Amino acid sequence: MNTQPEFGELAEAQNLAQTLAHELKQPIELESPDELVHRIALPPGWKIEETDHIKLASAPRRKVARVTINDANSFADYILRHKLTSYSTLWCEADYRHGAVAFTAILNDHGGADEYAQWRDHTAHYTPPKSEEWRRWFGQNATPMKQAEFAVFLEDNMRDIATADGLPTAAQMLEMALQFEAKQDMRLKSHIRLQSGGVEMNFVQDDDTGTIEKMRIFERFRLGIPVFWNGAAYAIDARLRYRVRDGAVSFWFELIRPDRVLEDATRTLIDNLLLATEVPLFHGKPQ
């Protein structure tokens, strides 16, 4: 029995193979804008796949970076190093009421005209660190403390008390703090507001003794502290408050408009950055 294909069948098979080879869709390489980029259209849905070999190049196509800087001078120096005339911008996002200030520099921001569009992906961020003095006083603001606890806080931060007409000196505040400690185990019997300012408190050891120890507390005092790390000192006033409950006294202070002090220090920082970089500044958050 002959199992070899006839000549006509062989020719038909060859024609079918040629037809299939011709009709079956093959990947097509597309034109690319860069010799390091390869684009191929793949059947059957002709999905385009792109391979970028930019890491094999000696240098990137353009600058792309997102850096965080911790020092104002370094922030200005970085802007000067990479800024583009008519493109670079500086942004300030400030919430003075909650004590938050941050800066963002966009080195390749959009220009004024439509043809000056940029990618906005080369940025530098700077959040000016608060001074240790500001963190302590602002962090403890309006927080009630026990008598001895408040005395220790005043002693630890006595150097921040500034001298001002009509307000207690650092030595007078220290004396008051030491009296707080000495009378922490005594009971407050009465307190009288003085016409000359302040409050006179009368303490007793127990109700059976007639010995009364007096102490005057001040209503206000002034701080002289820097807002930002290594920055200039600013004057900020504080009210001294107290509450009496079951013969025990709790104390706290309330900073008077610290938001204005922070705003003033921030404006000084802004002026210095503008002078150093000559980059336009906007108040807001860049999206």
Image (cartoon, rainbow, N blue to C red):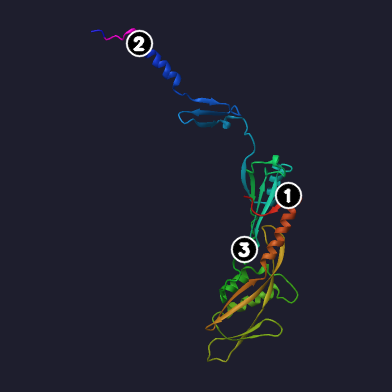
- Between marks 3 and 2, how big is the CA–CA gap? 87 Å
Q: Quadrant of residue 79?
A: top right
From the image, tell me which residue sits under label 1. Answer: 280
Q: Secondary structure at mark 1?
A: loop
9 is within the stretch colored magenta: yes
Q: Quadrant of residue 143?
A: bottom right
From the image, tell me which residue sits under label 2. Answer: 10
Q: Nearer the viewer, mark 3 or mark 2?
A: 2
Task: Pick whichever, 139 or 155, lies toward us.
Answer: 139
Which comes before the other along the chain, label 3 or label 2? 2
Which comes before the other along the chain, label 2 or label 1? 2
33 is within the stretch colored magenta: no
From the image, tell me which residue sits under label 3. Answer: 98
Badge 2 density bin: few <14, some 14–19, many ≥20, Cα 10 Å: few
Q: Residue at x 43, y 19 (%)?
A: 21
Can you give x and y, in whole percent of width and height, for residue 275 in the image?
76, 51
Q: Are marks 2 and 1 in contact (CB under 8 Å)?
A: no
Q: Secondary structure at mark 2?
A: helix
- Between marks 2 and 1, how big is the CA–CA gap? 80 Å
